[in-house]
Amino acid sequence: MAEGDNFASIPGQCLLGGNSEGERAEPASSMSWRQRAQRLQKEAHVFHYAFKHPRTPWYAKLVAVCTAGYLISPIQLIPSFIPIIGFLDDFLILFLGAKLLQRIIPADVLAECRQSAEAAEMRRREEIPSSARTAAAMVIVMAWLLLAVAASGLIAAYISH
């Protein structure tokens, strides 16, 4: 992991690579999509620990539940099946929810949750070797490809009759 990727080192660090004072640890343009996705995943773990933390205010828990609820809800402002635009509202809600949570969760609680998330990530990496993660990813990709081929065959058979 690169030095700029360490979330636990800066207590007020934001979702996409800066801290709450407006400074950027790493320019967003130099981050790959994979790095952004990893940061997003880390922040999700931090907010999960914050949700479970006993000193997190009830209204912060309500914001977290509403944000997550909107993302998994089948009823949305812009349906997700619409290309590009459908995911913009999801991203906007996620971004605004994360920013709001960073402001309303006490800094010491957020710092504890960042440390807990980092420790959990280290344990996960020690428990699951990278070859097993790669094999699991390959199995999932193959399953999706087989499902896509089967669905295409069924659609072709339906259209040809």
Image (cartoon, helix red, strand yellow):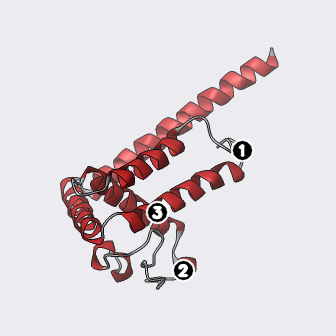
**Of the pair 3 and 69, the residue shown nearer to us:** 69
Q: Which residue is mark 3?
A: 100
Locate residue 9, reporting x and y percent: 28, 79
- Pointers 2 and 1 in contact (C-beta within 8 Å): no
Q: CA distance from mark 2 to mark 1?
A: 28 Å
Residue 133 located left or right of residue 74: left
- Circle 3 sits in a helix, a strand or a loop, which is it? helix
Residue 143 located left or right of residue 150: left
**Of the pair 132 and 117, the residue shown nearer to us:** 117
Label 1, residues with CA under 10 Å away: few <14, some 14-19, many ≥20: few
Q: Residue furthest top?
A: 161
- Circle 2 sits in a helix, a strand or a loop, which is it? helix
Q: Which residue is mark 2?
A: 30
Locate residue 159, reporting x and y percent: 79, 21
Q: Nearer the viewer, mark 3 or mark 1?
A: 3
Q: Residue at x 48, y 71 (%)?
A: 16
Q: Residue at x 28, y 57 (%)?
A: 56
Q: Nearer the viewer, mark 2 or mark 1?
A: 1
Locate residue 88, reporting x and y percent: 64, 55
Q: How many marks?
A: 3
Residue 144 located left or right of residue 107: right
The image shows residue 93, relative to residue 14, as above or below, that is: above
- Circle 1 sits in a helix, a strand or a loop, which is it? loop
Q: Which residue is mark 1?
A: 82
